[in-house]
Amino acid sequence: MKTKKIPVNQAVPGMIVAENVYTFSNQLIISEGTKLSDKIITRLKFYSIHQVIVQLQDEMALNSPVNPVNSNLYLGKMRSTEEFEDFSSTVLSTVGRFHNAMDDIANNNGKIDTDSLYRDIKKIMARGRNNLHIFDMLHCMRDYDDMSYIHSINVAIMCHMFGVWLNFGPRDLETLTLCGLLHDIGKLVIPSEILTKKETLTQEEYDLLKSHATRGYKILEQHDINIHIKMTAMMHHERCDGSGYPMGLTSAQIDRFAKIVMIADVYDAMTSSRSYRNPLCPFEVISLFESEGLTKYDPKYIMTLFDHISQLYLNSSVRLSDGRVGQVVFMNRNTLSRPVIQCGEEFVDLIKFSNLYISEIL
């Protein structure tokens, strides 16, 4: 049997996996002989698996080019509005100040001015009419490939939304927002060639990348800031079932603010562009949260996300995997990733069509 190693971006449903696929933590995620489906391909992307070995069946299919992400009218229209120009300008100017402040902290032990950092995030929040509008504008910036700064600002914005959804008081709301903003500070001392590498990392490189959690804690340890911010820097890659790192903690041992940041971190990372892949559709990420979320994440917080995501994407225009365009008219409460789509006069309940999914929000 002939096999071939291909980029995950070239994988298509129906291909057969020729070897077991493991995460860097040695967790088996796909078994040899598994037939790829859209959900399994998304799972590979979710775990940042860059390549997979498949049985060589159709040379033309394996050599077919990767389809580029389709541009769409909605994002184009939004990007041309004065509101988005104001929003993106505010975000990018904040990125510049945040970049300088973080470099000073990481390399020169500069002071952390939490008041100034929080004011900047609130300025961005003030540029949106509501959470849905802010989500829309963040979605328009998803193809900015910035692993450290824009990502941290996006996570801070999502954490602020979480705090509002959870009815946090002013002090906890500020703390949670800053937890999101500073969670990845340890990446500033990781070589950029590792952060942006397109090929699969070696075990040594992956171990160095994972060290950003403890390095972030050490950077923040000596600063006079809230202890939750320090704990989040170290714990945002822990998981409630003990499968995370650096310490393999379980739910009761993980800081409550870190439990929220880890959800926002994953959601933003997977729906944003990276050097090794295009951004995933939010419905793909929701599908993975639905299948793994209640074990890996605190049910209280993952259900909070589900409750509000259902409101955010209702009435959105979407493209289905078969190319049809329609509107989300009903969110299936128990399976948010598979809503009912109106395509012209037809209503398509995705729960009834396992081979059909939402490929893009328009």
Image: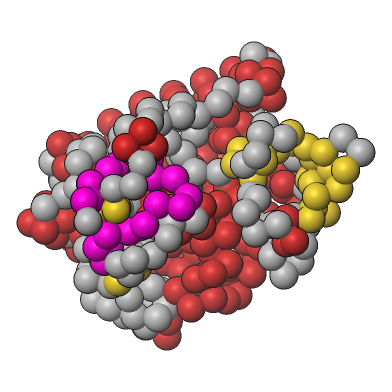
Nearest the viewer among 137 and 160 is: 137
Residue at the (54%, 69%) spot, across then down: 291
Residue at the (87%, 35%) spot, across then down: 344
Instruction: Classify residue 309 as left or right of residue 349.
Output: left
Residue at the (32%, 37%) spot, across then down: 59
Nearest the viewer among 62 and 274 is: 62
Estimate the x, y position of residue 90 in percent, counting from the top left: 52, 25
Find out whether residue 205 is within the magenta segment.
no
Location of residue 104 by image quarter: top left
Classify the position of the N terminus by image quarter.
bottom left
Tell how many labels. 0
* Span highlighted in magenta in the image: 2-21
Q: Residue most toward the bottom?
A: 252
Instruction: Classify residue 273 as left or right of residue 293.
Output: left
Residue 26 appears in the picture as rendered? yes
Residue 225 appears in the picture as rendered? no
Residue at the (57%, 23%) spot, across then down: 71
Q: Residue most toward the right?
A: 345
Find out whether residue 10 is within the magenta segment.
yes
Instruction: Classify residue 145 as left or right of residue 220.
Output: right
Instruction: Classify residue 307 as left or right of residue 27.
Output: right
Q: Residue most toward the left?
A: 204
Classify the position of the C terminus by image quarter.
top right
Location of residue 245 by image quarter: bottom left
